[in-house]
Amino acid sequence: MDLHAWITQQVDAAEKRARACDATDWRHVFDGIIVDRDTDGWQSAPDNARIASVAYERIYWSTSPAHSPHADHIVSNDPDTVLRRCEADRRILARHRLDPDVTYEPACKGCRTYGDQDMSWTDNLNDCPELLDLAHAHGLTDRILAGLDRPQPPEQPKREPHPDGILGMLRDAFDHALTAPITTSDVPEALRGPRWKP
């Protein structure tokens, strides 16, 4: 499994966890009050309690002290927010992937190129700075990175050699050029002159 596949696995897991949650009406309930699931009544929470309680098919968070940054953070990372982040991660993964046009190295398609030959800036997909930053957000460590496979260049279809060698290839190309019919039927109407013949 390379870096791209590892990130995809982490995004899939985060999305699965978020989809398992009730994604509606997450809010920070004021301090000291929670919903008692057994009696459907209100009761006081103990001092300095951090309690998550599910009632009426909605998720409520209550923490001490009131307006705690912990609760605000939890509410701001509700399932809908996580799903949007997963979608953004997938867009980055779609751009930064193995470049099938580069046959000599496993280059990143999303990274920039340089030079008049459009050489790939990132020679190996596991070295892509965008993917490394994305992986860091999903908990990538140096140990995990060291254990990942290094991508290989895309395999190219094998061509059978011409039975007559290079001279046979040249002969066939020359024969094709001399015998291939020249047609003008696909010329657009706007480019046809008054003496045009199909």
Image (tube, rainbow, N blue to C red):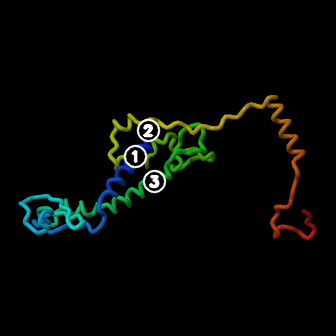
Q: Where is 117 relative to 64, above or below? A: above
Q: Where is 17 relative to 152, above or below? A: below
Kindly check if marks 2 and 1 are in contact, taking CB atoms under 8 A apart as contact. yes
Three-letter amino acid code at the position of disc 2: Met
Residue 190 drawn at (x, y percent): 81, 70
- Badge 1 is on which residue? 9
Q: Where is 169 relative to 30, above or below? A: above
Name the mark nearer the viewer: 3 or 2. Answer: 2
Three-letter amino acid code at the position of disc 3: Ile
Q: Is residue 63 left or right of residue 109?
A: left
Tell me the residue at 56%/47% (across/down): 114
Alpha carbon separation for disc pair 3 and 2: 18 Å
- Badge 3 is on which residue? 92
Q: Is residue 64 left or right of residue 86?
A: left
Q: Is residue 111 left or right of residue 66?
A: right
Alpha carbon separation for disc pair 2 and 1: 10 Å
Foreground residue among 58 and 65: 58
Q: Is residue 192 left or right of residue 34?
A: right
- Badge 2 is on which residue? 1
Alpha carbon separation for disc pair 1 and 3: 14 Å
Q: Where is 141 relative to 198, above or below? A: above
